[in-house]
Image (cartoon, rainbow, N blue to C red):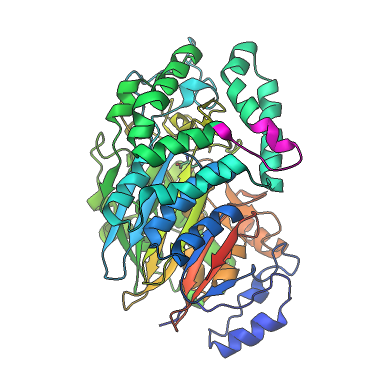
Amino acid sequence: MKRAAELSSSRRRGWLIPCLLLAACQLPATDVVSRFPPWWEYGGAAPVTSAAHGMVVAAEPHASRVGRDVLAAGGNAVDAAVATSLALAVTYPQAGNIGGGGFLLARFADGRAAAVDYREQAPAAATRDMYLAADGALTDRSLYGALAAGVPGTVAGLWAAHQRFGSQPWEDLVAPAIELAEHGFEPGRELRQGVRKVLERIAGFDAERRRACAQTVSTFAPALQPGPFRQPELAATLRRIAASGPAGFYDGPVAEALARSMRTAGGLITTEDLERYAAEWREPLRWHYRDHTVLGMPPSSSGGAVMTLMANMLQRYALPDMAWDDPGRIHLSIEAMKRAYADRNAYLGDPAFVDMPLERLLSTAYADERAAGIDRRRATPSTEVAPGLGPAFGRGEQTTHFSIADGSGNAVSVTTTLNTSFGSLVSVEGFLLNNEMDDFAARPGFPNAYGLVQGEANAIEPGKRMLSSMSPSIVLDPDGELLLVTGTPGGSRIISVVFQSIVNALDHGMGVGQLVAAPRVHHQHLPDVLYYEAGGLTAEVVSDLRRRGHDVRAREHFCDVQAIVVLPDGSLTGAADPRGGGLAAGY
Ligand code: DON
């Protein structure tokens, strides 16, 4: 078995130390580090934290420390997930939330695994064409303003996980978030930049929308002032949640205020929608890659299914024998992505509403059929993979992932979001509401904020969960032992990037510092474009891919992976993506 091994604790120490450690760890002769372009912004590896007992890697340092402290005080990985998630709702409001949703995947030392789907739902009054103008054109109301919000799931989801697996009192896990909201914290550069952008955007809205976003302005403008940033209204809401659990959010004054603000600002969520919301327990999806088992999310996330399909298609090629930057390897990965995303967009949706051909999609026989069309030398045009073409992808985006491993061998992987940065930009009772409705196919056959061209399976229906790409994942080694906890934000790129973090460990022996730093590529069927991270491939590799027929384009800032790798001696190594401002906190 080839276990991923850690290479360097310093991002910019150059090549020498990683190479020596590689030799010591007896990894394959192919030195993956020296195959990142020499000018690569993130060097050979991100800083790595090692720990004997427990680790939390999150996108914002206060939240990582909150989770780590819960572990150090005797809490388990699920306890730490609850506390970390609620802390992120305070310190990382771009994506951390109580007004959004997410997916929590847990794997326990005794071999059990469980997943909670706390994805938002369309309100009961939602209709299929609610975001279309009179002439049938798509409006931006699925992105900004009260109408963009789905019924939030986060409080119900965290509560469900805690009820079943938590070991510490709920109110103790909410307490650190209350403390951060009440007494404040020093906002980092990322938060200040985010707030600045949001205030600018709101200032550009028409008067009606500006009114709907007034509370967001008064809540977040103080983050730009010197000194600690306090959120007293959020602290009060969190206090209700600490005292009453989900009833503090889905019932009573918070629910009433939310429904009232919807009525005045043109949104649809009612107190009945809130009362009716329930998190769903799901059976984690298990897929296999080169003798390893990967636990992933089933629908209403598309993550696990798309990765299964990609892995099944790629198993037939000797990818581990090919260098990390071999254009032939990148070409095959991209061809698999293209086909898997085409199927995602056509077939997947909320299992309560859509009869999905999952058994067939996830079978090796289907992957054989799909892969039969892959030409090793030429890109297959997307029009030949499935019909229909859409324009380019990408508007503002933000989600967040955290990975946790505790001292008893339990692991939790959580991705949570408001959808794009600061969600709908509408706040109530100190928290932001999501704009997750844009993840539906608001107009089937036309692209959403991530350029995803989706079909009927993901059309809007009352009470339906919008299809997600969030892909919290946990990898087990061939003996069934915990090896890797990983995940990322990034909209449609989440799936391809999490997949790359996994194969970079399993095929190329990357340690945690490398797999978070490695350059990334992406294809999502439509648009028919191979995206690579600016500076991440050499001109020769790009030219080779173009000769194969790919439309190759560079993009900045590819995601924000937070990962933990367990070393062969059982110790933990964690690294936050150097593209973001996260922290791996261990003890
Ligand atoms: O659930 C989804 O697929 C999207 N709402 C995720 C959004 C996202 O990752 C934005 N981030 N960078």
**Where is the N terminus found, in terms of image quarters?**
bottom left
Q: Indicate the position of residue 296 as horizontal and vertical percent values.
A: 36, 57
Query: Is-magenta flag for residue 229?
Result: yes
How many badges with numbers are in the image?
Answer: 0
Q: Please state which of residues 477 and 497 is positioned toward the viewer in this rendering.
A: 477
Query: Is-magenta flag for residue 49?
Result: no
Q: Please state which of residues 285 and 361 is positioned toward the viewer in this rendering.
A: 285
Direction from residue 3 to residue 394 in the image, left or right: right
Q: Indicate the position of residue 317 as horizontal and vertical percent values.
A: 42, 70
Observer able to see residue 487: no
Q: Is residue 319 above or below residue 242?
A: below
Q: Please state which of residues 225 and 126 is positioned toward the viewer in this rendering.
A: 225
Who's the residue at 42% across and 67% down the image? 406
Who's the residue at 71% across and 83% down the image? 16
Who's the residue at 43% across and 46% down the image? 469
Observer able to see residue 143: yes
Direction from residue 157 to residue 203 in the image, left or right: right
Query: Picture quarter containing residue 512?
Result: bottom right
Who's the residue at 67% across and 60% down the image? 536
Q: Is residue 547 above or below residue 131?
A: below
Q: Indicate the position of residue 412 as horizontal and vertical percent values.
A: 40, 59
Query: Picture quarter containing residue 191?
Result: top right
Q: Indicate the position of residue 213 as horizontal and vertical percent values.
A: 59, 22
Report the span colored magenta. Answer: 220-232
| Residue furthest top in the image | 134
